[in-house]
Image (cartoon, helix red, strand yellow):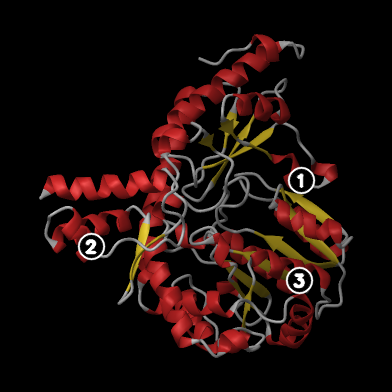
Amino acid sequence: MSTKYNEIIDEIKDQLAKGLLIAGSKLPSVRQLSEKFSCSKNTVIKAYDELEKEHLIFSVPKSGYYVVNEFQNPDNKNNIIDFLSAGPDKDIMPYIDFQHCINQAIDTYKEELFTYTDQQGLYSLRLQLVKYLQSLQVFTEPERLFIVSGSQQALNLLVSMPFPNGKNNILIEQPTYFGFIESANLQQATTFGIDLSMEGIDFDRLEYMFRNNDIKFFYIVPRFQNPLGHSYTNKEKKRIVELAEKYDVYIVEDDFLGDLDPNTKSDPLFAYNPSGRVIYIKSFSKVFLPGLRVATIVLPRLMINNFSRYKFTSDFNSSVLSQGALEIYLKNGMFSSHVKKIKELYSRKMKHLQEACELLLPNNTLYTKPSSGFYLTIFLPEKVTAKQTVNLLKEQNILVDDAARMFLPEYKKDNLIRLSISQVKENQIHTGVEKLAQCITFIDSKKNDIYRNSFQLL
């Protein structure tokens, strides 16, 4: 039985590799393969189950088995160590589970797929999100939620629209998420910065900025910040909200990695003023499927009508199919199960990365130490620039990110690189950091640019 089982798997994989089967191709029926290989139907089903677990095929009830995507032979892939990509780990994504949710969503919302729906998003999804947000200590009601096409859309709309406080300027942590800086630049919004380190921010400086700079809102990533990985304490978060209340400043809280927090007592800023001072944004792109393009924003009631007008001019409403599939995924408990797995995975990867940094990086190289999340930032020695490091490592198939784009011009630093653990393989982390350390040591020992032609990484 085991020989026939392996023969079936090998034949399907061989046809995929040769391009004889492509995305969407229907596979032979269980009966056809059992006759071809002179084996039982159970053997064929077992082989198909194994291929389904490897995300190569998927089943459609009462229809058969189909190819998920074009097959890529692992032997043909470049041996890239990817500390750059920030999407979720592809090896743990619930493709098959979500396939079923999409199919069910098509059946459930077939009429809505061909009509315009509620601008705030499917009410049934907002009900599920209200329940889900409670696990993150965000207690609200569906009337205050909007479904948006990713958190980037929410941020872009907030930059452009007027706020009830009548103020005009924006305050951001430095460094911060590049996408927000880009939105502010394109819309020519006056943006101020405040220095952030793993020790936090200067609260005297924050109060000065709130009091004197006509701040519309403070954009903040309270947990596992991009790019530092910094997280605020509850005491600090409460203080920030109190200052915002005192000086009539809104807070835009981007809690995109809140699901990964190992500290069960950690609260979002929203918890310290749920009535309307804090605008809470939760994306599903980093812990789930980026292509879903679904996030939610919790708005103060004062801003709902205005936000609705601005969103209408952007896209009217977000994808109904994505919304329906997410609703089903949340409702049946699959999302909670998935989050538990990724929480353990990213915590373990981050621990491996920090152990490698501690063991291998040169003494004059500093790095941040987040408890989980995606990101860790390395502060290079004085003579080593991020640009040099990124380019040299790229030649060795190691990808890291230059953090220069995450600063406003007056704060810009050229010696920070960001590592993301989300898509790097666990067994590549040590090797990647070892080569990074060699690169830093080499550049630091040189005083000119001739190094490129002579350096060979071990």
Q: Disc 2 designates what residue?
A: 32
Q: Given the image, on which type of amino acid does mark 2 rest? A: Gln
The Cα–Cα distance between marks 3 and 2, rounded to whole angstroms, is 57 Å
Q: Is residue 369 above or below residue 362?
A: below
Q: How many residues crowd around disc 3 within 10 Å: few (fewer than 14), some, or many (20 or more)? A: some
Q: Disc 3 designates what residue?
A: 158
Q: Residue at x 26, y 58 (%)?
A: 48
Q: In this orientation, which residue lies closer to the viewer: 325 or 414? A: 325
Q: Quadrant of residue 115?
A: bottom right
Earlier sequence position, callout 3 versus callout 2: 2
Q: Disc 1 designates what residue?
A: 407
Label 3 sits on a secondary structure element that is: helix
The Cα–Cα distance between marks 1 and 3, rounded to whole angstroms, is 20 Å
Query: Is 422 positioned to the left or the right of 456 in the image?
Result: left
Label 2 sits on a secondary structure element that is: helix
Query: Is 306 positioned to the left or the right of 12 in the image?
Result: right
The x and y percentages for residue 137 are 49, 73
Which one is closest to the eye, mark 2 or mark 1?
2
Can the viewer see residue 42? yes
Q: Residue at x 63, y 67 (%)?
A: 150
Earlier sequence position, callout 2 versus callout 1: 2
Tell me whether circle 3 and circle 2 mark residues in contact (CB < 8 Å). no
Q: Residue at x 30, y 54 (%)?
A: 51
Q: Given the image, on which type of amino acid does mark 1 rest? A: Phe
Q: Quadrant of residue 256?
A: bottom right
Query: Is 97 positioned to the left or the right of 438 in the image?
Result: left
Q: Given the image, on which type of amino acid does mark 3 rest? A: Leu
The x and y percentages for residue 308 are 73, 84
Can the viewer see residue 362? no
